[in-house]
Image (cartoon, rainbow, N blue to C red):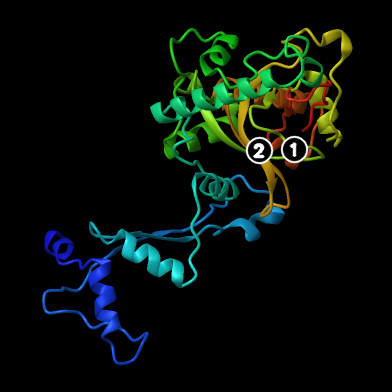
């Protein structure tokens, strides 16, 4: 690699050699001191099939497939200009994050939320959101105290864990191991002999598809359905529900189980889509609600094989409905 990097000619030298070509625009021949260049290609398979609606699996699987190109030192700009001239498109952090969003996978440096770089990025984004909120006139911005929203400018994961009775200090860990996630999934569908102790206090990365109208925004609340909500959802009523006036100040009306980190319309899924994190303890309680309702009345496999919960966008001035 050192010899290849040292034999790299400057652009000025290459332009001089191009000017001496008999046919303008022809290919340059390698010089006596130049060696063949070896590159490393790493394939990415694209979006996985997990967490997708059944009717949209074929349209999303494989989205974002491509290659990573690794080059020796000092050869980056030469390849960059060549790829741009041949039709390649450049993109930044925003486009890269939405590409991962369509794929339904994590995106660094924003994920996982327990990483130091993700925590630093969250502090910057919360500061910008607070400054934008304070620049707006009081009549043109929502009152988070009236809407009973804690930490409106960014998720406070330790406070979320504390609201579920977890006394761990600091940031809750994120469950990242594929084997652990598969084990938790199997135990959620067979809770009779399950042991959820190893997953207590862990955050889970989730992909969520909207069942009705509305689009979850960044920092939207992921709320646990009540027993009445479960009965209504089991009947097939997937419409949203209004926040009762007499319970606006009651933060525990629908308990917060997580937060949305990115939400928008997904072109691959043809529906509104969100990525977020929730506590494993909340998923266990949600599954217990569905199992309890199943024992009372037999339901279809569709409702028993999917998690249904509510989103609440708190950025609006009025009391927005909960959406499924």
Number of the label disc, if any, that sits on residue 215: 1
Q: Is residue 125 left or right of residue 288?
A: left
Name which quarter of the figure residue 292 lies in: top right
Return the disc, 1 or 2, that comes first in the chain's sequence.
Answer: 1
Residue 60, placed above or below residue 221: below
Q: Which residue is mark 2?
A: 263
Residue at the image position 61 percent from the left and 56 percent from the top:
60
Residue 73, placed above or below residue 319: below
**Residue 125 percent location from the top left of the image:** 55, 27
Query: Which is nearer the eye, 193 or 184?
Result: 184
**Residue 35 percent location from the top left of the image:** 16, 73
Considering the numbered disc 1 on the image, is that residue within a helix, a strand or a loop? loop
Name which quarter of the figure residue 220 lies in: top right
Image quadrant holding the N terminus, namely bottom left
Camera sees residue 174: no
Q: Is residue 58 left or right of residue 73?
A: right
**Residue 153 percent location from the top left of the image:** 62, 21
């Amino acid at each position: 690699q050192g010899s290849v990097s040292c034999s790299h000619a400057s652009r000025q030298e290459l332009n001089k050699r191009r000017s001496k070509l008999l046919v303008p625009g022809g290919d340059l021949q390698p010089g006596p001191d130049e060696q063949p260049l070896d590159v490393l290609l790493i394939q990415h398979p694209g979006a996985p099939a997990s967490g997708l609606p059944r009717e949209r699996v074929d349209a999303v699987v494989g989205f974002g497939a491509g290659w990573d190109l690794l080059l020796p030192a000092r050869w980056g700009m030469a390849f960059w200009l060549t790829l741009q001239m041949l039709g390649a498109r450049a993109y930044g952090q925003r486009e890269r994050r939405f590409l991962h969003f369509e794929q339904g996978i994590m995106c660094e440096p924003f994920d996982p939320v327990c990483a130091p770089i993700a925590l630093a990025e969250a502090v910057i984004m919360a500061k910008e959101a607070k400054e934008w909120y304070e620049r707006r006139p009081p009549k043109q911005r929502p009152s988070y105290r009236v809407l009973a929203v804690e930490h409106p400018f960014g998720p406070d994961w330790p406070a979320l864990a504390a609201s579920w009775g977890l006394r761990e200090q600091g940031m809750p860990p994120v469950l990242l191991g594929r084997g652990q996630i598969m084990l938790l999934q199997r135990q959620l569908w067979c809770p009779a002999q399950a042991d959820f102790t190893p997953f207590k206090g862990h955050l889970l990365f989730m992909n969520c598809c909207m069942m009705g109208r509305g689009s979850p925004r960044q920092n939207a609340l992921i709320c646990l359905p009540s027993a009445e909500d479960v009965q209504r959802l089991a009947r097939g009523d997937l419409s949203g529900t209004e926040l009762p006036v007499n319970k606006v100040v009651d933060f525990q009306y629908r308990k917060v189980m997580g937060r949305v980190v990115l939400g928008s319309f997904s072109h691959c899924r043809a529906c509104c889509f969100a990525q977020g994190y929730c506590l494993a303890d909340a998923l266990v309680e949600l599954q217990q609600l569905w199992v309890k309702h199943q024992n009372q009345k037999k339901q279809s496999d569709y409702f028993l094989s999917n998690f249904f919960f509510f989103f609440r966008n708190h950025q609006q001035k009025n009391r927005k409905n909960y959406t499924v």
